[in-house]
Image (spheres, grey):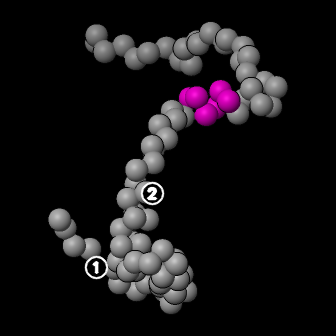
Amino acid sequence: MATLLIRNLNDRTKARLRTRAAKKGHSMEQEARELLARELARAEPEEEHLVDRIRRSLKRSGGGDIPYVPRELYREPPDFTR
């Protein structure tokens, strides 16, 4: 098993941890372990792709149908054959 040292824990957080642990009848260390284990056991949401976020945003605003505009050359490409 590994050991974890937490520094600079603010007084309010420490007091709340102590109170929670006392109510359950165990140590602050045990309460901290259980809190960490419970939080980390939650399933992490899948990362959403940017294109899906844009589509959802457009759908909410009533838009989404972007007209197709064919691309045209801005200028003639350079001739490197000379």
Q: Are marks 1 and 2 in contact (CB under 8 Å)?
A: no
Is residue 15 part of the magenta span, yes or no? no
Q: Residue flagged by tag 1: what amino acid is it? A: Leu
Left or right, 11 with reference to 31: right
For image coordinates 51% across by 33% down, the residue present is 49
Question: Vertically, is 60 above or below 17?
Answer: above
Q: Is 50 positioned to the left or the right of 63 in the image? A: left
Question: Could you say whether the residue bearing mark 2 is in a helix, strand or loop?
Answer: helix
Tell me what residue is drawn at x 17 percent, y 65 percent.
1
Residue at the image position 74 percent from the left and 26 percent from the top: 59
Q: Secondary structure at mark 1?
A: loop
Q: Which residue is mark 1?
A: 5
Residue 21, percent from left and from top: 46, 78
Give 20 or 43, whichever is nearer the viewer: 20
**Residue 36, relative to residue 30: is it above or below?**
above
Q: Quadrant of residue 58?
A: top right
Residue 6 as seen in the image, left or right of residue 23? left
Q: Is residue 70 visible?
A: yes
For the residue carrying disc 1, how many other residues have a C-alpha within 10 Å: few (<14), some (14-19), or many (20+)? Answer: few
Start-end of magenta stretch: 51-56
Callout 2 amino acid: Glu
Which quadrant: the C terminus? top left
Apparent side of residue 64 relative to residue 51 in the rendered image (left or right)? right
Q: Is residue 49 above or below residue 43?
A: above
Residue at the spot x=43%, y=65% of the render?
Answer: 35
